[in-house]
Image (cartoon, rainbow, N blue to C red):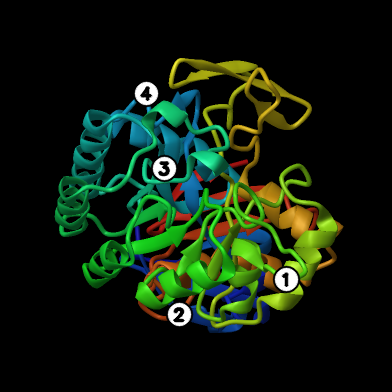
Amino acid sequence: MSDMLALSARRIFDGESWHEDAALVVRGGAVEGIVARHEIPAGADIVEAGDMLAPGFVDLQVNGGGGVMLNDHHDVEGIETICRAHAPFGTTALLPTLITDMPDVTAAVVAAGIAAARSKVPGFAGLHLEGPHLSIARKGAHDPRLIRPMTDMDLALLMAAKKELPTLLTTVAPESVTPQQVAALAGAGIVVSLGHTDATYATARAYAEAGATKVTHLFNAMSQIGNREPGMVGAALAIGTIHAGLIADGVHVHPANIANAVRAKAGPGRICLVTDAMATIGTDMTTFELNGRTIYRKDGRLTLEDGTLAGADLDMISAVRFMHRTIGLDLGEALRMASLYPAQAIGKTDRLGSFTRGAAADIVALSEKLDVSGVWIGGERVFQA
């Protein structure tokens, strides 16, 4: 068996442009390049991959999957289950996400993440800690009893964790975190995202200047655009360096607002598709627990008993289809929102989000109907339809 693999397809999207009737050449788990079919190197193992190949999807907000929530299964096995559950939907790199919880749970998740990184769990790209330093006024499904200001101890834990993790992203609100703390986090290499906040435009801009570079689930759980006060949404759209996560399921955000946001975000900060997925992905479960409260699954929605949205019943290929078919986005741009732009948001474009030479051979094979037919992580096939 050769150490070189050539995946042949009718079209290959490299993260920027399309290649017709070509092959993606992989060696040692990394991308070698894209060649015409007749230029496939001698000795390569050839795989006929079908209609389309694209860079594997990068999801920066994944609370659970495969029947598991990170909040309840804060160990390597739980992280493995979540990563494995999302692979059939094209996600090859993700950040398991902890929803606001107790300090001991946060510490356990950090320890599990470090162990997962050392074990090289396929698909594990780091951690996202969503809370507990949020605004109670914009808590969403987060338990208000667990929301609290950031302390020096919290800051020290995050900064120490970053030294052991490939990526650490944290969602915070100005109501609970100071600009000085944001600057310290960013200086340590932590990706700081603003979310679950009632921040004004001026406050949001000040926190972006302090080092925040992202916004968590744009439009949801944040101050909205007003005629004289643009709020957090207005700041996210106006500040060019801010990357904005977006839940594209037709439930969390109206399609007209999504279309407006796409037009507004021209870069370098872009819109990144996120699933905000919960335990339901890859299962037929209809209920599960979060912080002792029941979450109900019905008609594509996940809600608390009072109807509050609680994460999303969404996978990444469905988000890509929604952006392409419902919003009318060019397929290449929809794919970038699921791969290249998230990689840019966490500073990992050398390995993720494109088929540049030396990048990880994280690959999704798609049919013309945008069904996932195969997935490879580091050149190893992890799913075949």
- Give the CA separation, mark 3 to mark 2: 28 Å
The mark that comes first in sequence, 4 or 1, is 4
Label 2 sits on what residue type? Thr
Q: Which label was assigned to residue 266?
A: none
Q: Which label was assigned to residue 72?
A: 4
Q: Quadrant of residue 191?
A: bottom left
Q: Which label was assigned to residue 228?
A: 1
- The residue that label 3 is drawn on is 97
161 and 366: which one is in front?
Answer: 161
Q: Which label was assigned to residue 356?
A: 2
Judge the density around disc 1: few (<14), some (14-19), many (≥20) Cα neighbours within 10 Å: few
**Residue 363: percent from the left, percent from the top?**
51, 60
Q: Can residue 208 be seen in this view?
A: yes
170 and 270: which one is in front?
Answer: 170
Q: Which of marks 3 and 2 is in front?
A: 3
Label 4 sits on what residue type? Asp
**Residue 34: percent from the left, percent from the top?**
53, 80
Disc 4, disc 1: CB below 8 Å? Answer: no
Vertical placement of 292 versus 179: above or below?
A: above
**Residue at left 59%, top 46%?**
275
SS state under label 1: loop
Disc 1, disc 3: CB below 8 Å? Answer: no
SS state under label 4: loop
Which quadrant does the N terminus fall into?
bottom left
Q: Can residue 43 be seen in this view?
A: no
- Give the CA separation, mark 4 to mark 1: 43 Å
The mark that comes first in sequence, 2 or 1, is 1
Which quadrant does the C terminus fall into?
top right
